[in-house]
Amino acid sequence: MAGIGVRLNKIYGKNTIFSSLVGFGYSAVISVAPMFIVIITLMLMQKLLGFDKVGYASRELFSCTVLYVCMFSLLAEAPFNAVLSRYMSDAIYQEQFGDIMSCYYVGLAGSIALGCLMGIPFCIHEHLVGRVELTFVFGTFVGFIAMILVFYTMTYLSICKDYKKISLFFTIGMAVAFGTAYVLINFFHKTVIYSMLAALDVGFLVTASLQMAVVRSYFKENSGNYGDVLQYFKKYWQLILINTLYTVGLYIHNFVFWTTDYRMTVADSFVCMQPYDMATCIAMFTNISSTAIITSRIEMHFHDRYKAYSEAVIGGRRMDIESAKTRMFSQLSQELMNLVRIQFILSVVIFLLCSIFLPQLGFGGMVMRIYPCLAAGYFILFIVYATILFLYYFNDLQGALYTTATFTAVILLGSMVATHLPQIWFGAGVVAGALAGWCVAYSRLRWIEKNLDIHVFCEGSILKKGKGRKPSYCVFNRYTGVGTGQDKL
């Protein structure tokens, strides 16, 4: 993660309040801008294209469709993202650039296949049981696949440090989407929700096409080593579970509340709980800046300490290694504390603004009663995400797996309990799960600090592993001058 560090160092190096604001804005733009671009486009469509004049049932059908497309496209892509990121990073480090397109096509085929397994049965149910028109169902499926392509290709551009191009392509795609919807409604006189859905499909496809074109322009050769890519799924199976569990953990509490009496069913297919889902969205936005903060802090500070330790391990004295190790973990602790301090201030300010202005915009009542507890839960949850990144740095996949499994399981159980509590405590499951995940992750980082020498110097093997007869424990006999033979396994 050394892509944006140079730029951020130049910005923060001026040591002024304005430069700090600029640096935060820059890191926010490169990390979370695509999400805001899509949301702003949807808000403009709804405000300027007559969405409020559409019937209630049609509005809810469109809203649930967008919710499901975004949520389940992330779930469909989650099992492949981390493993393929690891493979691509290794290929770049080894300068085997021809393997990257092999990696891309394997992941693309897997993501689309999983998306079809999830999407096709649902679309059939939506049409046959929900009696939704086939054209709308087809548009839903196209948007779902297009969103999978967008999220999947973003991974490769992120590794290539093309954050600006990601934001640019989202801007172009959503501008095309808004223009398409405007033309369909005002010139071809199509219905609003059909036009908006078709426009989003076009916008997502344009965004995905631009991203794929850039990836192809970077990596023009394809080695065809598809078998090597598949071997990574076997070798790093923990990454599949880690990323999948983390993504599921972000939404599993929503699924729990979709089973309560507060749920709403649309077209006998879509299930949601609007107040809870809206409170979840606002809580995520309240704390989403932590992603930008930890990215910039790692880029500017921790990466250099980690690099210094790695160089000391390769050719330094023991005292140099110990000194670099101490400085590295001291920096790690400092970055976590700085993240908590900065994010706490930002979250409190955003929470205050939301509490004042959202009720005036119609987001009151049950939404604002659920929101505070969820905001606290996501505050802790994004801190857990930062610790998982540090565990990745030390290649502690087992620790990251323990962390994600713990907080996902606790969120599930805690949310089931929270459904029986007053509305103000509906988010208690997220808080409990995030705290449990933080405890596991922090304990694991402390364990790594104490056992890093073993982790670094004792993980290798002098003899090549294989099957067969084990060599004798006696390597030399002083009477015969040779070993005593071999022992059977």
Image (tube, rainbow, N blue to C red):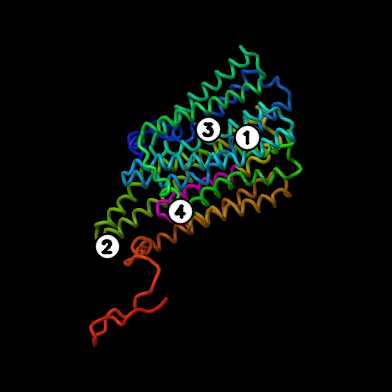
The secondary element bearing badge 2 is classed as helix
Q: Nearer the viewer, mark 1 or mark 2?
A: 1
Image disc number at residue 236: 4
Please say whether residue 341 is visible from this viewpoint. Answer: yes
x 36%, y 38%: residue = 3
Q: Amino acid at mark 4?
A: Tyr
Q: Residue at horizontal 58%, vertical 23%?
A: 199
- Judged by depth in the image, the label closer to the viewer, 2 or 4, is 4
Quadrant the N terminus occupies: top left
Q: Earlier in the sequence, mark 1 or mark 2?
A: 1
Q: Which residues are magenta?
A: 375-397
- Distance in Å between CA atoms under marks 3 and 1: 13 Å
Q: Mark 4–mark 3 contact, CB under 8 Å?
A: no
**Residue 96 location, x and y as percent?**
33, 44
Q: Which label was assigned to residue 318?
A: 2
Mark 1 lies on residue: 67
* Front label number (2 vs 3): 3
